[in-house]
Image (cartoon, grey):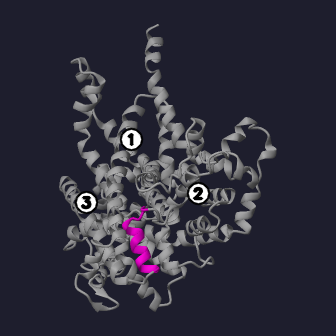
Amino acid sequence: MRTGRFQPWLYIGLALVLVSFFLIYPSIHTIFLSFTRSGEFSGIRNYIYIFTNNTMLTALRNNLLWVVVATAFTVAFGLILAVLLDRVRYESVIKSIVFLPMAISFVGASVIWKFVYAYRPAGTDQIGLFNAIITALGGKPIGWLIERPWINNFCLIMVWIWIWTGFCMVILSAAYKNIPKELLEAARIDGASEWQVFWKVILPLLKTTIAVAATTMMVFVLKIFDIVYVMTNGNFSTEVIANRMYKEMFHFRNFGKASAIAVVLFVLILPMMLINIRRFREQEAIR
Amino acid sequence: MDRLTRSLSRGPLHLVIILIALVWMLPSLGLFITSFRPSQDVAYTGWWTVFEHPFNFTQYTMKNYVDVITKQGMGRSFLNSLLITLPPLFMALIVGSFAAYAFAWMKFPGRRVIFVFLVALMVVPLQMTLIPILRVFNRLHLAGTFPSVWLAHTAYGIPLDIYLFHGFISGLPKELFDSASIDGASPLQSFFKIVLPLSVPAIASVSIFEFIWVWNDLLVALIYLGGSPDVAPLTLQVANLVGSRGQDWELLTAAAFVSMALPLVFFFSLQRYFVRGILAGSVKG
């Protein structure tokens, strides 16, 4: 297309200005701030704090737990649903049901699940679904969001899995439908069981898409904030990095520490970002 | 006979699928039903007990909705959410489509590098930007006002918007633009006469992404708008209610449902474009 020398810059100008001011400049500034305390240079003291303070270490451990568990379950459930649903005629209805929580805010989902986890003392009627099931089976009610550190953290992660499985299902299902069905038929005719077809044919062919789903999930999960903020506010050993940053920033006004926490979060996300950029450039090259 | 045994052997498959769907729906169903139950019922019996006499309509009430909308500030927040969401939505469409058009069809030095860099910014965590931006907003007396979140949301969405628009606009046939420029159309005319009318699916995808992302956002509102109920969007108001009325489930459920209603409508009417946007962003590239 023939354009003047300056014309393209008019088209991308506003985007560049906004992104420079709201993403690039503050990121650089935050890196500087992370080496200061109360406006004075403090070397790596904020970073030492992050890796020695108990609450921070709990937050780091929980983020690791979130990344591993949430990613594994969303991708695995997504994959299982993609493969199973392809075999039934009411596929689109079930897909809508599983995908629907994507439209719900983390805050809304937190209320929904906090109610599922609601606790009443033993002997009274339970109003939360989980404890009602447990007491109906003869068990004792459990304080799901208080039992530290595994039960409550897994209960929080479950909310995430409920929301994001639909996302993984959608992209894995699209990739699955792209596999030529003759390939699967050929394997079956050669005597492969459904189980073998899944592990030896489907899984290798979906490898790239699974990687995409997993890296995308990891990037999102690392930034988890809303669910923890609403459901436990990081109490009972459920702290996560982003909530810790919010507290350092707003409750304690430690902007240096808060900045350092943000930088740590960024560094954790960086590898995933590099993988995505490489994939993106490869696709651009194909185009 | 053969068909019968085949359907029977598929029984477990159907069972598993329907069970999964049920498990996925139950939590939302509980929320929905509870929001229509009187407080004394909610406090002492499970929501599933309504199924003992599902058509006994005296056990349902609209009082919770009236309460949260008039007394708990959810009416005001609904309006705030609309006021917060719509301007960035339009800004995103304009800024994103213009930039993507230039990246797709104009030649200029640094085009590819800038484009890849812009899209890569998608993964910068917002946390990296909060403190410096808040300081600037404070100095400009923008903190706690709608323009602060309009600007921030527009900017934060740009990488994804450009990416989605670019995927679509760069796929338009080259001949369209060639013949338009032979006819003497300027790039701007081509944009309005060719690109925009053909990009309706991309516009729908970006709109629903932006809408759901901004409407459901908590963090950006929490930081830049602060706690004032005058400007609080629904997410913030619901989060505050969880803090202050944590055991009043009839109110919390009604408030949560008010906050979810519009995204759900959007979702059901535009699900196709939502899915298409997700696929554009992850599979096709």
Q: Which residues are magenta?
A: A237-251
Q: Can you tell which of label 2 and label 1 is closer to the viewer? A: 1
Q: Is residue A22 above or below residue A89?
A: below
Is label 3 in a helix, a strand or a loop?
helix
Q: Chain of mark 3?
A: A
Which residue carries the number 2 mark?
Answer: B260
Residue at 43% over, 46% down? A166
As displayed, is residue A47 above or below residue A166? below
Is residue A25 in sight in this rendering? yes
Report the disc number at residue A77.
1
Coordinates of residue A280 in the picture (x, y in percent) = 23, 57
Q: Position of residue A104 (x, y in %)?
A: 52, 55
Above or below, comparing residue B136 to residue A71 in the picture? below
Ranked by sequence position, the earlier of labels 3 and 1 is 1
Q: CA distance from mark 2 to mark 3?
A: 31 Å
Q: Which mark is residue A272?
A: 3
Q: Amino acid at mark 1?
A: Phe
- Left or right: B225 with respect to A263? right
- Mark 1, chain letter? A
Disc 2 + disc 1, Cβ < 8 Å: no
Q: Is residue A231 left or right of residue A19?
A: right
